[in-house]
Amino acid sequence: MTQPDAARGRFWFDVTPDVSKSDQKLDPPEVPQVSDVPVSTLFYGDNLDVLRKYIKDETIDLCYIDPPFNSNKNYNRIYNRIGKEDAAQAQAFVDTWTWNGLADAGYVEILGNADGRFSSQTVELIKGLQAVLKKGGLLAYLISMTLRVTEIRRALKPTGSFYLHCDQTASHYLKLVLDSIFVAQGGDFLNEIDWCYKSGGASKRHFSRKHDVIFLYVKSAEQYKFNYQQEKSYNRGMKPYHFKGVEEFKDEIGWYTMVGMKDYWNIDMVGRTSAERLGYPTQKPEKLLERIIEASSDKGDVVLDAYCGCGTTIAVAQRLGREWIGIDITYQAISLILHRLEGKPGNLAWPEIEKSIKLNGIPRDIESAQALALKKDDRVRKEFEKWAVLTYTNNRAVINEKKGADRGIDGIAYFMATRDDNAKVVLQIKSGHVTRGDIAKLRGDMTREGATLAVFITLEEPTAPMKAEAKDAGSYVHALMGRSYDVIQIVTVQEILDGRRLEIPMTLEVSKRAKTSASKSKQTSLLDEGREAANDGDEGGDD
């Protein structure tokens, strides 16, 4: 007997981001005019702003989201019985989900329902949850999700489907929210899918928690799209049944039939040895997204991921011939997605793919760069540093996430020093006032870090004493290139916006394994080619 063939999809592409607006608002946010968006676009910014400003009604075939709430070590515990954090009760959020001006503005917007965007069931649900949960982190999270899922439902086509990926910590609350948004307006709940996996760690105080929850809702109970999926069902004893009219197959395990796919999926996580592994903490396996995309969309359909993270949804949608829209609020995620789409070193298709990339929401002029750099919220301001480091190094640097002990080093990159070895470049970003003392300090940081070169990126124009201090650091002669480089290079944000990029030929792999793999790594182009790539990437984008 033969085995059924697996589905195959075509490979194609395009990309675009938008920076979040105010950090804190006490009034409900204004709803900007929705504009046309080219599909296959990557947005950088707050997904609520992007959804309201750019995504038109009934333009999305499938939306999958995996919002940043989990019960792992990256998040605090939270359950709110009396309005304050109760760490002894249950799992919760970092300060992203504290009750603040944004949460209060969202609460006021939902209860006021001035433009009628929320169903009466949603309004009453949030009002009731406030009475039970009080104003704390969990309610702030549920309000955030209510605002965004409401916009996602608006953007879905009548045949559209919505998948929400979560864990068991808040799934019971989220299902109430989804029921009030979808079912109350003619949609339907189809499945609670359990994604089962193996992972390390097991408690002796309860059953091991080894599954995530994925809710599947559709916008219309009458006309949704679903492509029937099948899976193997092995015969008892692995022997043929010989049932009349039943086709049977055999593989290395034994005899099986093909049956309708169930709602519990055994799919391996992205483990430490997985070829897919990017080092992103919440990375999902491509097989999981393949199953979702193939079930609820066709080739040419538009897939939306409003929390696209490391870009698994985007990569799979592209490979399966779907158009796509991705949104993420961190530039580090945007950089990782671009790096992922580039693929392996030597990818001949990448130059043409890169030309089609459109980025929306990243700084395009000095005013927008200053706006990002001078945000009051330190978490948002950090995005300016990430943008500067990753853009200047063509997405080849490693961001320094350490707090307190970083001593001014914002990023690290590696370059080919010889054919068999590499060396380190440290990068420092300053958005405030700069002086000669900053360059002198950077010289000391270089020594401590064992770096060969340093880059000082400044929003302000450097002073003459700063330039002199940098020149005093001397020059470095590159053996492969046969030319010298300043040991300390001062680069302005305006120069980055104009297309300047790191001149040194760099290794394509800049992870912790860079030193051991440097001799096998490819090299990037020099300054002129880097400027061409930057200009190509900007072509056709919106601010």
Image: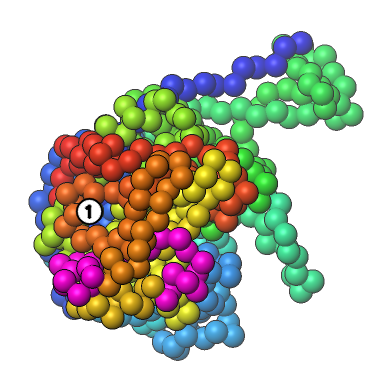
- Looking at the picture, how far across and down is residue 119, in whole percent? 26, 58
- Residue 274 falls in image quadrant: top right
Q: Residue at x 54, y 77 (%)?
A: 77
Please indicate, yes or no, whether residue 193 appears anywhere in the rendered image.
no
What secondary structure is marked by label 1?
helix
Q: Residue at x 82, y 23 (%)?
A: 252
What span is colored magenta in the figure? 444-468
In the displayed structure, 1 sits above or below 238; it is: above
Q: Is residue 210 left or right of residue 54?
A: right
Q: Residue at x 41, y 87 (%)?
A: 83
Seen from the viewer's position, the closer of residues 322 and 167 is 322
Question: Which amino acid type corresponds to the residue marked 1 in the rendered image?
Answer: Ile
- Residue 104 falls in image quadrant: bottom left
Q: What residue is pinned by disc 1?
A: 496
- Looking at the picture, how far across and down is residue 294, in whole percent? 48, 30
Category of crowding for the residue at label 1, using alpha-carbon neighbours closer than 10 angstroms: few (below 14), some (14–19), many (at least 20): many
Q: Is residue 430 left or right of residue 34?
A: right
In the displayed structure, 409 sits above or below 178; it is: below
Q: Is residue 4 left or right of residue 235?
A: left
Seen from the viewer's position, the closer of residues 255 and 454 is 454
Please indicate, yes or no, whether residue 413 appears anywhere in the rendered image.
yes
- Looking at the picture, how far across and down is residue 236, in whole percent? 85, 30
